[in-house]
Amino acid sequence: DKMPKNQLLKWRKEINNIDNKIFKLFKKRFQVSRKIGNYKKKNKLKVIDFKRENQLIKKAVKKSKLSKNFIKKLYSLIFNESRRIQND
């Protein structure tokens, strides 16, 4: 493939911009997660809610059209970090 090098650089820049947005959204998500953790502590609720987690996974698989395996792995990382934050 003789793709111009500048096209590759453009795509990489686009990927970098998307990644920056994703990480900003993760930061916001975990800030909200901390608020939820505080609420749960005050109200003596469990941090883990498997029912909700499974609902989020099913919804994401259905809406995103990405592989179920990928969604599960990604959410597993997100849920673990959220739990860590909520347990602080």
Image (cartoon, rainbow, N blue to C red):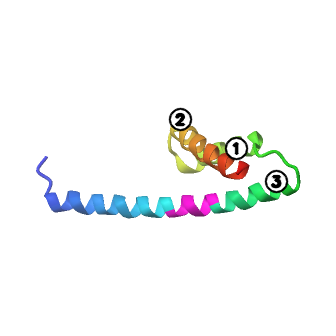
Tell which residue pokes out farthest to the front in this image.
88
Q: Quadrant of residue 32?
A: bottom right
Disc on the earlier residue, 3 or 1: 3
Left or right placement of residue 63 versus residue 9 in this view = right
Q: Nearer the viewer, residue 80 or 4?
A: 80
Q: Nearer the viewer, residue 10 or 78?
A: 78
Left or right placement of residue 12 versus residue 44 in this view = left
The span from disc 2 to disc 3 (Cα, nearest Å) is: 29 Å
The image position of residue 4, as x and y in percent, is 13, 58
The image position of residue 28, as x and y in percent, is 59, 64
Judge whether 27 appears above or below 69 on screen. Answer: below
Judge whether 69 appears above or below 34 on screen. Answer: above
Q: Amino acid at mark 3?
A: Lys
Q: Mark 1 = which residue?
A: 53
Q: Mark 2 = which residue?
A: 69
Neighbours of disc 1 within 10 Å: few (<14), some (14-19), many (20+): some
Judge whether 75 appears above or below 29 on screen. Answer: above
Neighbours of disc 2 within 10 Å: few (<14), some (14-19), many (20+): few
Residue shown at the point (55%, 42%) measured from the top left: 71
Q: Mark 3 = which residue?
A: 40
The image position of residue 63, as x and y in percent, is 58, 50
Q: Quadrant of residue 77?
A: top right
Q: Nearer the viewer, residue 29 or 7?
A: 29
Q: Amino acid at mark 1?
A: Glu
Q: Which residues are magenta?
A: 24-30
Residue shown at the point (51%, 64%) measured from the top left: 24
The image position of residue 11, as x and y in percent, is 28, 59
Q: Residue 71 bears which disc, if any? A: none
Q: Amino acid at mark 2?
A: Asn
Left or right placement of residue 66 versus residue 60 in this view = left
